[in-house]
Image: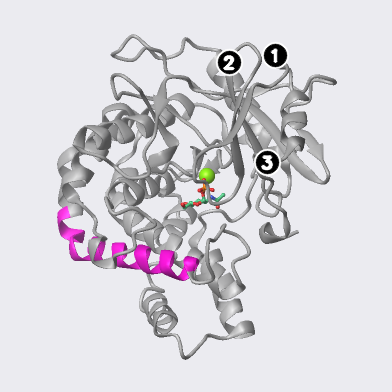
């Protein structure tokens, strides 16, 4: 089933309450409201009868066809962290990980309702997140959040994690899929933006295998990764602004840390954000990259190899390009993967990422120097 074939439930739907109440929480549920701005799953904040908060999600099985593997990875991650004390933050608060709440009967970690997969997670209380980086302090916390996450999971053996989304972040696979789409569906020649995107991709084909080649050559090793460490997945303590959690654990699986580092910097160093309406506002801000990468390395530096560091500048460029390619491909495919608000939405998102790539390319030397300086 494709992502777009699944009806998106609304908070007004009484069915949602029944689904939330099928999990082991205090009932009746007091409140239920949409949460966040994810491009794939549907997310709701749930308030239980005792006032405690939870996060209810409908997992998009068009994207994640094997929910049991996704939940298995989240459970494995939880067990891995249970074996050690939760890191204490400067504010005295502990670092948190969203946990799966079992179903009321049978204790499963997720439920199937009308062919859809639902799960309930613990809520990270007294926290906030933003879609774009607010200032250099926020940038540092976003970097520290990813560094802490990598530090906590780097010794979790990859063999214990399932591959929940085959080919995720393997750029050559996205390029191959894109080329098939171009061959089968063609391009709207009347659309200038589409012609621009096609030329933009064609000019950068040599970049595509950069990370996968390094992996095949043994220069980079697979490790557990988060898979989607974008700015709004970093939760900050409401009072101190310190990062307290990195949420959205669906894409935790074996991969390259460069995917995560590249994605974090791609998302965090573009203050105009992924949904920027004005392309001229899109740029890669080195003044944000410095604290973000610095914050990351503060925690992650001890387990990174020289090759890991060397490939960071390539990763920043590649992952921004890759996301642009994924958006453009989805536009060509008829918007089947990412949720869209209008038919050109994915095309516009692709243009934002490609503009970001241009800005990264214009500063490639400075990015390399920064990585060398901080590493
Ligand atoms: C998707 O659903 P969301 O917003 O958490 C996507 C990421 C992209 C991101 C871009 C499983 O994440 O890879 O970077 O959109 N997740 C998946 O906003 O494809
Ligand atoms: Mg995500």
Disc on res. 58:
3
- Magenta residues? 345-366
Quadrant position of residue 317: bottom left
Tell which tag, 2 or 3, sits nearer the viewer. Answer: 2
Residue at image location 64% in from the left, 39% down from the top:
11
Answer whether labels 1 and 3 touch (C-beta < 8 Å).
no
Disc on res. 52:
2
Distance from disc 2 to disc 3, alpha carbons, whole Å, reads: 20 Å
Residue at image location 70% in from the left, 13% down from the top:
26
Answer whether labels 2 and 1 touch (C-beta < 8 Å).
yes
Image quarter (top left, top right, bottom left or bottom right) of the C terminus? top left
Residue at image location 72% in from the left, 55% down from the top:
6
Residue carrying label 1: 26
Q: Secondary structure at mark 3?
A: strand
Residue at image location 61% in from the left, 72% down from the top:
334
Quadrant position of residue 21: top right
Answer whether labels 2 and 3 touch (C-beta < 8 Å).
no
**x, y (%) of residue 63?**
65, 53
Distance from disc 2 to disc 1, alpha carbons, whole Å, reads: 8 Å
User: Is the residue 198 above or below the residue 221 in the image?
Assistant: below
User: Is the residue 185 above or below the residue 87 in the image?
Assistant: below
Q: Is residue 192 left or right of residue 242?
A: right
Quadrant position of residue 339: bottom right
């Amino acid at each position: 089933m494709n992502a777009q074939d699944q009806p998106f439930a609304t908070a007004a739907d009484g069915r949602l309450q029944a689904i939330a109440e099928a999990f082991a929480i205090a009932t009746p549920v007091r409140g239920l409201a949409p949460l966040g701005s994810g491009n794939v799953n549907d997310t709701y904040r749930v308030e239980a009868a005792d006032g405690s908060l939870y996060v209810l999600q409908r997992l998009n099985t068009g994207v994640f066809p094997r929910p049991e593997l996704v939940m298995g990875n989240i459970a494995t991650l939880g067990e891995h962290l249970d074996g050690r004390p939760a890191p204490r933050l400067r504010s005295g608060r502990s670092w948190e990980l969203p946990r799966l709440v079992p179903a009321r009967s049978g204790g499963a970690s997720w439920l199937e309702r009308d062919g859809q997969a639902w799960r309930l997670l613990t809520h990270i209380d007294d926290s906030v997140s933003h879609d774009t980086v607010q200032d250099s302090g926020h940038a540092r916390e976003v970097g520290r959040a990813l560094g802490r996450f990598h530090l906590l999971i780097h010794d979790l053996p990859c063999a214990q994690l399932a591959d929940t989304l085959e080919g995720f972040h393997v750029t050559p696979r996205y390029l191959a899929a894109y080329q098939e789409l171009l061959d089968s569906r063609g391009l709207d020649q009347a659309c200038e933006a589409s012609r621009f995107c096609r030329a933009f991709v064609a000019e950068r084909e040599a970049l595509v295998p950069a990370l996968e080649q390094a992996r095949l050559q043994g220069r980079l090793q697979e490790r557990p990764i988060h898979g989607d460490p974008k700015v709004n997945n970093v939760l900050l303590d409401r009072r101190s602004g310190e990062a307290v959690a990195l949420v959205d654990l669906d894409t935790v699986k074996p991969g390259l840390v460069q995917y995560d580092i590249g994605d974090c910097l791609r998302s965090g160093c573009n203050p105009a954000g992924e949904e920027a309406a004005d392309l001229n506002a899109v740029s890669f801000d080195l003044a944000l990259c410095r604290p973000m990468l610095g914050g990351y390395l503060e925690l992650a530096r001890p387990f990174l190899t020289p090759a890991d560091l060397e490939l960071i500048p390539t990763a920043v460029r590649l992952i921004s390009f890759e996301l642009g390619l994924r958006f453009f491909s989805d536009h060509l495919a008829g918007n089947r993967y990412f949720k869209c608000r209008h038919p050109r939405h994915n095309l516009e998102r692709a243009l934002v990422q490609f503009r970001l790539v241009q800005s990264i390319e214009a500063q490639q030397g400075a990015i390399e120097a920064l990585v060398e300086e901080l590493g």
